[in-house]
Image (spheres, helix red, strand yellow):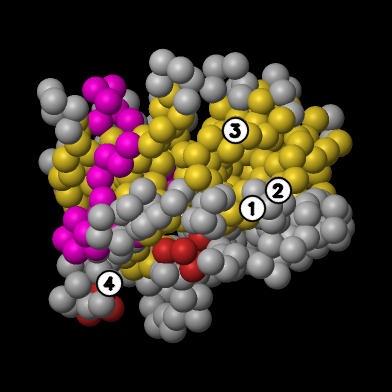
Amino acid sequence: MNFRSFCSVAHTCILNATVLAFSSLPVAGQTFTMLHTQSGNQDGSPQQSYLLLGESGNLYGTTTSGGASGYGTVFMLDSLRSETVLYEFPGLTSFGIPHGILVRHAGHTYGIVQNGGEPGCQNFDCGAVFDLIGGRARIVHKFSPSEAYHPTGSLVKDASGNLYGTTWDGGSVNHGTIYEISGGEERILYNFDGPADGVTPGFLTIDPSGNLYGVTSFGGSFGHGTVFELSTNENGAWSEQILYSFRGKTDGGVPSGAPIFDGKGNLYGVTPQGGRNDVGTCRVNGCGVAYKLARNSEGIWSERVLYTFEATAEDARQPFPTLVRDKQGTLYGVSIYGGTNLYGTVYKIDHSGVETILHNFTGHFGHLGDGGQPLSGLTIDASGNLYGTSSNGVFKIAPQ
């Protein structure tokens, strides 16, 4: 399996799409604001960065380009949304290019680089986990061809500050792994053998008991991906349970983002494929679905499709990669394509499964442009404000 971007895993990103319309329709009750726009090549693009909301309301993220060497940065937007570059990555031979979600613990900021580190992983470097504190960065762990490599998605932490993540490649049969970093030491918790237990793991989430939940983009009973749980038994050994295998039909397929919980233990997520595949540009693979997984009294999980995205001029297409949830239970997400301008959307889905488009990206750049094709999920604060990234910078959507 070759080194891939998020887009190629989901088979959804075709960045040379022709777009004819450029208007953005305002949505009643919502205010869209660009907090920071890309100001040049050295500033870099945060398009693939998830935003971490800090204790003081500061936003933290990464860029995959920019900085003095052009290999990306870690940045902070303060409460006044003034940008500070916290670190500039020096290059591939030392650190690589940052990607995914940052994690903060005890004053340290942790993240992953998908390349850099040890060489020799399918014509790419193997990737690494880094730690940033006081403007200085160090490598916590370098992945290697002999174990796990090409870390993806995110790091999550438990109550003790132990870090957990996934790799696309490596492991016993090269179908990916789940790893832990504790006290600066890495160990493999699970090797995906595939196809039955999944192939190509994506993002993780963690519950209060320390159980890990995630998805694989491929494999499972039908080859279109899985939702899984990884937990320990009484002897401390980790084992996987498949909660759901996607069929790639009306139920969705090829997930990459971690599911999220509600207060009752139900799981919610999106897939960029599946759903309706009989119309328009979604005729082959479908435009994607939003789903819910619920567990019955016997411990058996079942799926319910909350919303099926359509190949219409108004709807979102290819939701990616995950959702956030507000205090009322409304779900929010982004789509790579669709909307009135075809450059993607921000949308919400209410309790009854009704979808509302909150913003249609125009694809415009420059000081006033909103960019388009958001490749990362949203962050939500206690007041219900949404934060995200597009091809032109960092945005906010405020409820009214």
Residue 101 lies, with reference to residue 265, above or below; the image says below
Mark 4 Cα shell of 10 Å, populated few (<14), some (14-19), many (≥20): many
Q: Would you name the residue on which mark 4 appears?
A: 285
| Region of the chain picked out in magenta, as a range | 241-266
Q: Secondary structure at mark 1?
A: strand
Q: Please tell me which residue lies in front, 73 or 340.
A: 73
- Residue type highlighted by circle 1: Tyr
Mark sitting earlier along the chain (3/2)? 2
Position of the C terminus, as image quadrant, is top left
Spatial distance from mark 3 to mark 2, Cα to Cα?
Answer: 12 Å
* Side (left or right) of 193 relative to 29: right
Residue at 50% across / 39% down in the picture?
190
Numbered disc in front, either 4 or 2? 2
**Is label 3 in contact with label 4 (beta carbons under 8 Å)?**
no
Mark sitting earlier along the chain (4/1)? 1
**Is label 3 in contact with label 2 (beta carbons under 8 Å)?**
no
Residue 346 lies, with reference to residue 77, above or below; the image says below
Q: Would you name the residue on which mark 3 appears?
A: 180
Magenta span: predominant SS is: loop
Q: Would you name the residue on which mark 2 appears?
A: 143
Q: Secondary structure at mark 2?
A: loop
- Residue type highlighted by circle 2: Phe
Q: Would you name the residue on which mark 1 appears?
A: 149
Give the x, y percent position of residue 254.
35, 59
Mark 1 Cα shell of 10 Å, populated few (<14), some (14-19), many (≥20): many
* Side (left or right) of 31 relative to 253: right
Residue 280: image quadrant is bottom left
Q: Secondary structure at mark 4?
A: loop
Spatial distance from mark 1 to mark 2, Cα to Cα?
Answer: 5 Å
Mark sitting earlier along the chain (3/4)? 3
